[in-house]
Image (tube, helix red, strand yellow):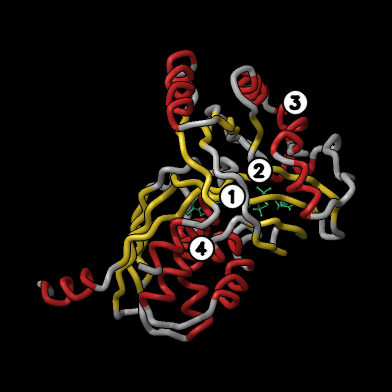
Amino acid sequence: MDTAADTTTQSAGLTLPAPAKLNRMLHIVGRRADGYHELQTLFQFLDHGDTLQLTSRDDGHIQFCGELGDLAAEDNLIVRAARLLQEHTGTTAGANLSLTKRLPMGGGLGGGSSDAATTLAGLNQLWSLDLDEDQLAGLGLSLGADVPVFVRGHSAWAEGIGERLTRVELDTPWFVVVHPGIGVSTPGVFQAPELTRDTPPITIARAIEGGTSSWRNDCEPTVRQLYPEVAQALDWLNARAPSMLTGTGACVFARVTSQTQALQLQAELECEHPEWHAFSARGLNRSPLLNALHT
Ligand SMILES: C[C@](O)(CO)[C@H](O)COP(=O)(O)OP(=O)(O)OC[C@H]1O[C@@H](n2ccc(N)nc2=O)[C@H](O)[C@@H]1O
Ligand SMILES: Nc1ncnc2c1ncn2[C@@H]1O[C@H](COP(=O)(O)OP(=O)(O)OP(=O)(O)O)[C@@H](O)[C@H]1O
């Protein structure tokens, strides 16, 4: 039994958050030749998300443990991020990666992208690789367009397919986030003929000066049409507080004025709609990942 080695590995471990994101607004301003859509969006983090435990091992093996349904290891963004870092740096180190999954998969909260970013940043530290933020964000982009914002860890205005980022400061209200218990297909939404793809581009200043009451998500009308459960959740929330879709859904979120109001709304919702899942969380302009890495 290799107790001494286990103890050493344990003491070198890290426990890090992989927070959710919200798209506080999302405009589709065009479509590229490869079919991907050009977006303008405001990203903000939530103080709610997954937790990843990372410990180093010296046999080069990447061992994952966690509940991700029937997702194959080669599709798991955590495993892919770890292998990408190994290939890029040539390190001989391996890792045990253990995930506590709280964010619904494919919910528009960016859980998979956030897990990947936490893996990149955590292993960079654990393996003493010394890659800088730009290098990690570049690697992250090859895993998914939403990964760089989680690596950089600041609220951001994003353009392109979401990879051109400008840091911003947004209001940080409480939110009630609701998953209406169904899965939304992101490719399906982006392929829908009725999707609005020609919103005129605006400047960051105009987006921010317009304020929360002017923010909307161009995917919302299409998602409402394709998924009546999302429409029902939005209508229920909108009757009580200003509410929107995040990403392509399925999650929707209500902006409220206090934690008390958030918890009251969540309790009312859980009573009337036990088939939906809800949580309350506060908006953050700095990701809890940055705080955890720099303490
Ligand atoms: C819409 C956002 O939620 C905004 O944060 C994200 O950009 C979506 O990111 P995601 O869920 O990681 O989605 P991806 O796995 O990158 O894309 C799934 C599919 O959606 C379509 N897609 C996605 C993003 C984008 N800007 N244009 C697209 O047309 C593409 O067909 C792509 O194959
Ligand atoms: N570690 C992971 N956690 C969650 N999903 C993962 C992971 N690795 C790969 N995936 C795949 O990525 C898909 C999208 O996951 P994710 O939870 O990031 O979606 P999302 O919340 O809709 O993100 P976005 O807002 O970027 O669209 C999942 O349906 C799943 O197939």
Q: Position of residue 251 (x, y in %)?
A: 58, 35
Question: Which label belongs to residue 117?
Answer: 4
**Observer-nearest of 169 and 288:** 169
Query: What amino acid does circle 4 point to?
Result: Ala
Q: Earlier in the sequence, mark 2 or mark 1?
A: 2
Question: Which label belongs to residue 44?
Answer: 1
Mark 2 vs 3: CB contact within 8 A: no
The residue at which mark 3 appears reads as 225
**Observer-nearest of 49 and 70:** 49
Q: CA distance from mark 1 to mark 4?
A: 15 Å
Q: CA distance from mark 3 to mark 1?
A: 26 Å
Location of residue 37 with respect to 83 vertically, above or below: above
Residue drawn at x 85%, y 58% as measured from the top left: 32
Q: CA distance from mark 4 to mark 3?
A: 33 Å
Q: Quadrant of the N terminus?
A: bottom left
Mark 1 vs 4: CB contact within 8 A: no
Q: Position of residue 50 (x, y in %)?
A: 41, 50
Residue drawn at x 41%, y 72% as measured from the top left: 123
Which of label 4 and label 3 is nearer to you? 4
Location of residue 253 with respect to 106 vertically, above or below: above
Q: Earlier in the sequence, mark 4 or mark 3?
A: 4
The residue at which mark 2 appears reads as 24
